[in-house]
């Protein structure tokens, strides 16, 4: 992976030992004049990016002003979700626009899923080394 940036897996529960390590990516979200430094769980099994309610509030979103409703599945199916956009700055790469399902759930991590994080970035997992590498997609020539 050319120009890849490598990151360590982070432990979510020290009591679990090595089984608790997860690929959390540090990055910054920007919406208008607000900036939030955060981490997102890289989840190749997630269909969409999921933004926790509190992070959306930090970015200045107002729930009632977001009119595009989205239905989530799995553990989050019981919560309403609204579609929001934000610029994401990952490492030293150019900012990209990410689409999120902003959920009212308060006990969910920020999740980076197929639509559209994995459409914008390539990720290589080195689980045995407790690391992963991220690189922006390579633009295709037309």
Image (tube, rainbow, N blue to C red):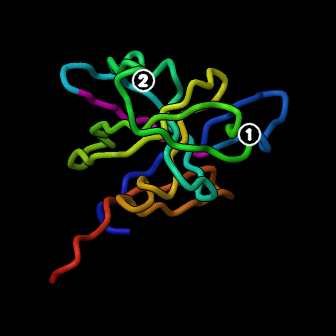
At x 58% / y 45%, what residue is drawn?
23
At x 26% / y 48%, what residue is drawn?
96
Farthest bottom residue? Answer: 142
Q: Bounds of the magenta span?
A: 23-31
> Where residue 76 appears, x then y in whole percent?
68, 37
> Where residue 110 appears, x then y in whole percent?
53, 34
At x 50% / y 18%, what residue is drawn?
54
Regarding mark 2 in the picture, which secondary structure is present there?
A: helix
Farthest left residue? Answer: 142
At x 51% / y 63%, what residue is drawn?
124
For the N terminus, the quadrant is bottom left
Q: Is residue 92 magenta?
A: no
Identify residue for label 1: 75
Position above or below: 73 against 119: above
Regarding mark 1 in the picture, which secondary structure is present there?
A: helix
> Would you say 23 lies left or right of 134 here?
right
Q: Estimate how packed mark 2 is, as few (under 14), some (14 to 19) or many (20 or more) residues with alpha carbons within 10 Å.
A: many
- Tell me which numbered mark, 2 or 1, is placed earlier along the sequence: 2
Position above or below: 56 against 42: above
Position above or below: 126 against 54: below
Identify residue for label 2: 56
Labels in figure, total: 2
Q: Quadrant of residue 120?
A: bottom left
Q: Estimate how packed mark 1 is, as few (under 14), some (14 to 19) or many (20 or more) residues with alpha carbons within 10 Å.
A: few
> Where residue 131 appears, x then y in whole percent?
56, 51
């Amino acid at each position: 992976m050319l120009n890849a940036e490598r990151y360590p897996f982070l432990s979510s529960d020290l009591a679990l030992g090595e089984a608790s390590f997860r690929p959390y990516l540090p990055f910054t979200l920007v919406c208008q004049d607000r900036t939030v430094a955060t981490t997102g769980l890289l989840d190749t099994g997630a269909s969409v990016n999921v933004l926790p309610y509190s992070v959306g509030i930090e970015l200045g979103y107002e729930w009632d002003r977001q009119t595009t409703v989205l239905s989530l599945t799995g553990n989050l199916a019981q919560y309403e979700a609204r579609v929001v956009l934000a610029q994401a700055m990952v490492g030293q790469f150019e900012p990209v626009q990410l689409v999120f399902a902003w959920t009212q759930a308060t006990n969910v991590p920020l999740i980076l899923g197929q639509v559209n994080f994995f459409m914008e970035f390539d990720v290589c997992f080195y689980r045995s080394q407790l690391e992963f590498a991220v690189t922006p997609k390579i633009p295709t020539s037309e």
